[in-house]
């Protein structure tokens, strides 16, 4: 899209500004020749240039080249396709919410804006001045009276906010509710698109105990571990007495290195189990743990899979994630 200067010396940046406003779902007042101003809708503000084989703009008026003529042409053509219309047509969403905070929420809002969607932020009371709430078109406080982290885990409040403000889809970001099958299920029940796996898939893969059970059914070799998750440290002690040390404690629902501890001596078990369980409860809303024999100096190789929900599945190749700090990948 090319901004055309007004014939009477108007703002040469008017058209690009209109495109930016259109991409954010807003209207903007543009100067036109002959005095006065005109309020441009998203459709009329976004002028899409099409080019012929000779590289010339076929839609550009040849007579006077004024911004007024360009805008009037776009406004008169009710079927003119705007930039945000082209992008939005690919997903059908016009308004999305990110159930997260910080950097990931900002990235989601930026992508949504580039796709012509209105974006909605949520924030806890302690995050009222956080950057991410000001990067969205709308922002709402959730979880009044909750802890700074707990506010982002109370998904019924988030869903109620989404419904009351016309949100069509929720992006969970990473951490928090991104691997919470109950949250994805509630979104499905309320007719809100959960941008991520189906609730059934999250339930199977998000619960490490269930995931290991499925892997076992497929005949894959597994590290010795507990068959079920537990919140009782006595179960952990019994497992250690059977399989020996060292033992790895892992949050049954979660990831990112949180809720994990290595136990090398039996007298450490109770303290480390309680710490890991408390950390998992705070981070993921569930403090249940499962145990595995700890493998010293392993190689951590991943193959990520991407699917679109209609049967198209690709893998993204192998990647070595062995370089870690605090059980979290440093290089991917």
Image (cartoon, helix red, strand yellow):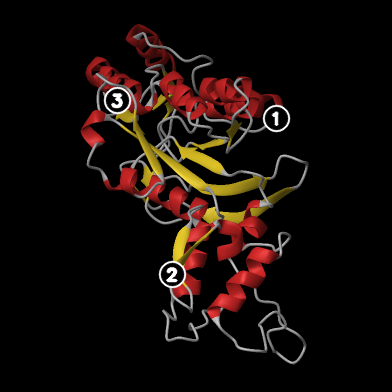
Q: Is residue 41 left or right of residue 249?
A: right
Percent position of residue 90, x then y:
68, 52
Residue beneath label 2, please? 36
Which label's residue is closer to the chain start, 3 or 1? Answer: 1
Q: Quadrant of residue 239?
A: top left
Helix, strand or loop for disc 2: loop
Question: Nearer the N terminus, badge 2 or badge 1?
Answer: 2
Structural crowding at the residue carrying mark 3, measured as other residues with C-alpha within 10 Å and reported as few (<14), some (14–19) or many (≥20) = some
Count of marks placed on residues: 3
Residue 295 is situated, as x and y percent measured from the top left of the image, at 43, 36
Instruction: Name which quarter of the figure residue 244 lies in.
Output: top left
Q: CA distance from mark 2 to mark 3?
A: 61 Å
x 50%, y 73%: residue = 15
85 or 111, nearer to the observer:
85
The residues bearing labels 2 and 1 have C-alpha atoms spaced at a distance of: 75 Å
Compared to residue 323, the image places residue 265 above or below, namely above
**Labelled disc at residue 279:** 3
Name the residue located 52 percent from the left edge and 82 percent from the top edge: 4
321, 61: nearer the viewer: 61
Residue 290: % across, % down? 44, 20
């Amino acid at each position: 899209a090319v901004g055309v200067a007004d014939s009477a010396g108007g703002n040469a940046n008017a058209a690009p500004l209109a495109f930016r406003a259109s991409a954010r779902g807003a209207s903007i007042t543009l100067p036109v020749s002959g005095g006065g101003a005109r309020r441009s809708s998203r459709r009329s503000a976004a002028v899409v240039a099409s080019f012929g084989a000779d590289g010339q703009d076929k839609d550009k008026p040849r007579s006077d080249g004024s911004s007024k003529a360009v805008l009037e042409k776009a406004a008169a053509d009710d079927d003119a396709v705007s930039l945000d219309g082209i992008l939005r047509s690919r997903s059908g969403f016009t308004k999305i919410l990110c159930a997260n905070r910080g950097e990931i929420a900002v990235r989601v809002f930026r992508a949504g804006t580039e796709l012509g969607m209105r974006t909605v932020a949520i924030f806890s009371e302690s995050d009222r001045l956080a950057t991410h709430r000001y990067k969205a078109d709308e922002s709402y406080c959730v979880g009044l009276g909750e802890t700074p982290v707990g506010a982002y885990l109370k998904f019924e409040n988030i869903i109620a906010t989404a419904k009351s403000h016309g949100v069509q889809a929720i992006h969970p970001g990473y951490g928090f509710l991104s691997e919470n099958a109950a949250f994805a299920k509630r979104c499905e029940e309320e007719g809100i698109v959960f941008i991520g796996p189906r609730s059934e898939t999250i339930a199977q893969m998000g619960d490490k105990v269930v995931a290991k059970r499925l892997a076992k059914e497929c005949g894959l070799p597994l590290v010795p571990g507990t068959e079920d998750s537990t919140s009782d440290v006595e179960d952990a002690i019994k497992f250690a007495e059977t399989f020996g040390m060292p033992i790895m404690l892992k949050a049954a629902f979660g990831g990112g290195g949180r809720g994990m501890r290595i136990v090398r001596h039996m007298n450490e078990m109770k303290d480390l189990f309680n710490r890991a369980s408390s950390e998992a409860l705070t981070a993921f809303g569930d403090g249940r743990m499962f145990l595995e024999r700890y493998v010293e100096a392993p190689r951590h190789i991943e193959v990520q899979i991407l699917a679109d929900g209609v049967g198209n599945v690709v893998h993204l190749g192998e990647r070595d994630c062995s370089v870690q700090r605090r059980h979290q990948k440093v290089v991917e």
